[in-house]
Image: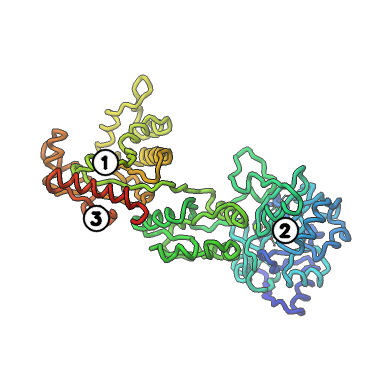
Amino acid sequence: MMKTYHLTNTQPDIEQASAILRDGGLVAMPTETVYGLAANALDGEAVRRIFEAKGRPMDNPLIVHVAEFSDIERLRLVSEIPEKAIKLAQAFWPGPLTIIMPKGEVIPDEVSAGLSTVAIRIPSHPDAQRLLKTSGLALAAPSANTSGKPSPTTAQHVIDDMEGRIEAVIDGGSCSVGVESTVITLAADTPRILRPGLITREEIEAVIGAIEVDHAVLHQLENNEKASSPGMKYKHYAPRTRVVLLRGSDERYITYMNRLYARDPHIAAMCYDEDKPQLDMPCITIGGMDDEKAQAKTLFDALRAVDDLEDVNAVYAHCPEATGVGMALYNRLIRAAAFEVIDLPEKRIIGLTGQTGAGKSEAARLLAECGFPIVSADEAARLAVEDSEVKAMLCASFGNVLLPDGSLDRRRVAQIAFSSPENTETLNAITHPKISEIMLAQAEKINGDTVVFDASQLFEARQDVFCYRIVGVLADPELRAERIMRRDGLSTEEAERRMSVQLSEEFFIAHCDDILYNNGSAEAFFDAVRQYGERWCADEQKI
Ligand code: TXA
Ligand code: MG
């Protein structure tokens, strides 16, 4: 391990840092975006050490930083300065914009990773400016994090990652922008954003006209797709803890999170300030809902804080809109989440569930009469088992369970699945996700804001998290046993066995928002269900 000097941003320390850089050493410097790990850009050997310190793949090129525009020509960093680069420079430099241009011969292969272009930026941070001017160098500098981790926005972040691997870090406080610069290439026919940042597409278009946003900014690269910016193909910004993005309205985010937490105490939220008072679980906040700049400034610190949470297996982040500065936030978060995104339903889903024999199906029929669209889990289950992937998985687990015509041998599946609790669980693990997918898709197609999920296994299939409201239909065990014996012609033992594998009354009471008891007369139950339905029809928004 080498000694890493912790320098201040005073002139003597800046001079020491400059000397280190001129000697081929590495210095982490503050910029307005994130901390950069700098080396003399024209010294291939020094640049190579940046890749070693970060553990960065050599095919990912670096940004060259200079103090002022005239340095680009003076040092012959590019072979040509496009007209649009001059316009962009006037509008946004010094500042958080990186422009890719055809490279000059002096650029070492280590910097450009063998490409014919080079990325240039003039940072506005006073400490970066002084270091560039004092050293007189062009500085190649990627973000000063270990490759794959969130970029550093404080000197402490840099020290956490780089202590003992670099010669020095200059402490310039926390970075004001917080996400890396917008990267735009002028080497393509139409200028194209390769990485979104604080300077937005809209702001750039106001200066140079229409531009494109590279597909990889918002989407995962397909296996055979080539990255226009090599940095986009790597796992990025990722905490060790699993991060999942939830895309949907504020209201759906809150209900999803609280229901999930009721089931799984090992989750946390990454959310806006306004969400926090409504959430039951530990929260990492990233700023006010409408303050995208504050969110950008906080994001990487928040992602680093994820791994400090104790006893948390997954963090669910409230997904930003991918427009304006939100595009930069979305771009970083979706990589932190390794592209794991859950789309929350737009509809208000009322989950209707309950114990066998309690009268749930009767309630569903009555609610349909009240005008509620019903999505039936039983019907979705029938469709799910005809899905080819589901059939393949069932065969893989239970042997060949297909009939000669290729359809599923349902009786055989039922026989195997209910022969042991393990087999039942296997069946559910295979079919439940597909059933939920079908039900959610059906719900979105229905007109109106509210739909009822008629689902006896609402909780087992984890559909509860999508529900805005959950109503459980319960009844005394003797009554339920009597009803299912009569309905399905079961013996007392069979009825008891079926009832014993169900969730307890306590569970329903704890996890449902409303309970409808069906212990009295049929008329009384019908009235209760109708009242419940009418309350929803008339008063949907208030509940
Ligand atoms: O705000 C920033 O840009 C910070 C500070 C330190 O200036 N730097 C930074 O560097 O974020 P880095 O290396 O972490 O990200 C540079 C990105 C990478 O995605 C890289 O692939 C891309 O820019 N890039 C660099 N040169 C390129 C080129 N010639 N063609 C295409 N992409 C390039
Ligand atoms: Mg980086």
* Disc on the earlier residue, 2 or 1: 2
Give residue 443's quadrant in the image. Answer: top left
Give residue 389's quadrant in the image. Answer: top left
Is 156 situated left or right of 51 in this image?
left
Residue drawn at x 53%, y 58% as measured from the top left = 239
Q: Where is residue 404 in the image (x, y as percent from the top left)?
A: 35, 19
Q: Mark 3 points at which residue?
A: 509
Please indicate, yes or no, whether residue 426 appears anywhere in the rendered image.
no
Residue closer to the observer: 248 or 257: 248
Quadrant in which the C terminus is drawn: bottom left
Mark 1, Cα crowd under 10 Å, few <14 / some 14-19 / many 20+, is many
Instruction: Name which residue type carries label 1.
Output: Ala
Q: Where is residue 516 in the image (x, y as percent from the top left)?
A: 21, 50
Which mark, by number, is residue 97?
2
The local secondary structure at tag 3 comes to: helix
Q: Name the residue under label 1.
A: 364
Instruction: Name which residue type carries label 2.
Output: Leu
